[in-house]
Amino acid sequence: MNPRPPQPDAASAEALPHELPRGVSVIMYRNGHFAISQRLNVEKHKGLYQFAGGHVEHGETTFRAAQRELIEETGLSLLAERFIFLGKTGPLTGYKGEQYIGHRFAVVLTDQEEPQRTEPDKATAWTWYHADAMVGLAMLQQTQNFAYAFHAGYSALRARLATLEAENAELKRSAKMSLNSYLDQP
């Protein structure tokens, strides 16, 4: 019988060769539009349109990294339940050829929540683009694919919820009419 091989502890797991660096991106979405900025004067992704995001720091969870990057790049500090985890992709190839795992999140903003330009040396102001208007933008393909998938899924979910709400209202109205009819009987 072979004894179980020793399990690495959390500290040594960070250094395992198969463990790739992690990055996060946060889609900001409102009424069918995405908030996007363009990278400036920064070697990494210079000239490309992007969502908020960056690397995961040592000891940081991907979720905390997403919250931190959103605050750093937009000034928006949102509660944990506002973040929707969309999935991870990878390995992806970075701008210098390095491999990493991308973790995608989304937040749905209200009309009162507006991302601010907090890093004017790195990116343009945040601009709202409808999903259809993103086609011609210089953007990483995997980023654009996630945006389209989120838009389609979120739109379908909202449509289904509206249908369910209408059906629920009709059921309530019908039940109320039936109850009133029953109560009116001698």
Image: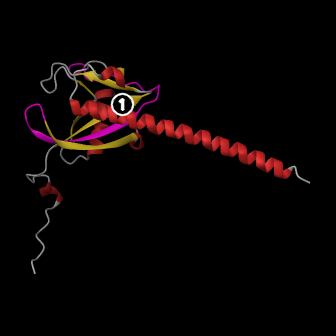
Residue 100 showing in the rendered view: yes
**Coordinates of residue 154 in the picture (x, y in percent):** 42, 36
Residue at position x 45%, y 27% from top?
31
Q: Amino acid at mark 1?
A: Met
Residue 13 lies in what quarter of the image?
bottom left
Q: Label 1's element?
A: strand
Q: Quadrant of the C terminus?
A: bottom right
Residue at position x 16%, y 26% from top?
45
Q: Residue furthest right?
A: 186
Q: Quadrant of the N terminus?
A: bottom left
**Residue 80 magenta:** no
Check the image and tell me how it is coloured: secondary structure
Please say if 161 is above or below 183: above
Residue at the spot of label 1? 28
Check disc 1: other Cα within 10 Å, few if <14, some if 14-19, many if 20+. Answer: many
Q: Which residues are magenta?
A: 94-123
